[in-house]
Amino acid sequence: MTAPLYIAYHSVDHSIDYWQKHLSPLVPGIELVHADEARAQEAEVLLTWNPPEGMVAGLKNLKGVVSLAQGVDHVLNGKTFPSHLKFARLIDPYMSEAMAEWVMLTVLEYHRDVPQYRAAERRKDWIRLEPNIAADTTVAIMGLGAIGSVVATTLTKLKFNVIGWSRSEKSLQGVTAFHGDDGFDACLTQADIIVSILPLTTETENIYNSTTFSKMKPGAAFINSGRGKQVVEDDLIAAVDSGHLRGATLDVMRVEPLPTDHGFWDHPKINVWPHVSAQTHGATSGPQIAEAIADIRAGRDPRNSVNIARGY
Ligand code: GLV
């Protein structure tokens, strides 16, 4: 019998059995072991979501890490990441499509005045509001990377006027793309609905605050499925309470799970989702994780390598 291939594992999301089941058919001999077990010291690869500080640096035989998510802030931000390690993240078409579905759902809720119609239903009130025309509605996608570009393109199919922002220059058919600091503000000022799917970096932390909310169009809606730490939450509540923003839909929070005493829960114009817009899925992401494990063990750069200095 060949020796088991130990791969270290730590996640506060899925169980170790979940990933063992999905990876066993793809990686011969794989045996996932909790990263704090002695056997994990033999592992060359760590699969992880949100490892505690010190865990990555403490695995002495490690050659690289695979993020069990599209984002990588849970591994890098405020945590030690030894520079010799390779680092892969997920770029899973299923997850990008799931995000596009969720964004369509939440954009359409505002576009089709769902809050007003549901409230009218509770009053047994047969109201008929003036329809909004998609082509006259500007939707801004903040973040036009692997996921954002799929989201933006999907929205163009519904005939919205789609604009978007990314840190570096991008070109995307049917989408007016902005970049740089000036482009960020231009996007905010033009959009009726702002959808943010930015990665969390030192540059994007707290990027949505009283100053940037005040640049948004009066009556704009704000949707966030990037990261909660990008939003100054009290500033968002103030922008909605003052009537400047029509409302907000959030899939990510500064603290998750959202504490039960948090003001978002009961706010009539803030919709809370429990970080489910594009969940990691073992069946669809298994093959690329298996490929990343093989690449890291062989000393090759994995396909979806993270640029550590850039932070995504
Ligand atoms: C989820 O938030 C992810 O980063 O994939």
Image: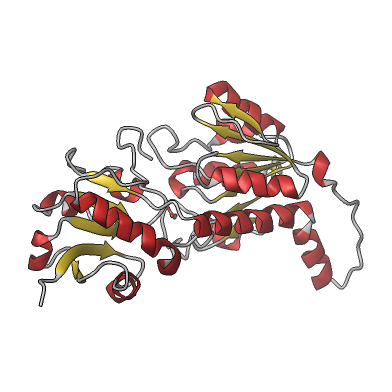
Residue at 19% over, 46% down: 299
Indicate the quadrant containing the C terminus: top left, top right, bottom left or bottom right.
Answer: top left
Q: In front: 27, or 19?
A: 27
Residue 222 appears in the picture as rendered: no
Give the number of marks: 0
Question: Which residue shows up at 60% across the image and 31% down it?
Answer: 171
Q: Please indicate whether residue 203 sits to the left or right of residue 80 in the image.
A: right
Tell me the quarter of the picture where residue 97 sits: bottom right
Residue 204 found in image quarter? top left
Please tell me which residue lies in front, 300 or 94: 300
User: Where's ligand 1: which quadrant?
Assistant: bottom left
Q: Position of residue 92 (x, y in %)?
A: 46, 55
Of the pair 1 and 160, the residue shown nearer to us? 1
Q: Is residue 295 left or right of residue 164?
A: left
In the displayed structure, 281 sits above or below 145; it is below
Q: Residue 149: give x, y in percent of width and height.
A: 58, 43
Evaluate whether residue 3 shows in this view: yes
Q: At x 56% / y 30%, what residue is drawn?
A: 170
User: Percent position (x, y) of residue 123?
Assistant: 84, 71
Q: State the quadrant of the N terminus.
A: bottom left
**Colour scheme shown:** secondary structure
Pick whichever, 80 or 312, lies toward us.
Answer: 312
Q: Position of residue 134 (x, y in %)?
A: 81, 46
Q: From this view, report whether residue 126 is shown above or below residue 77.
A: below
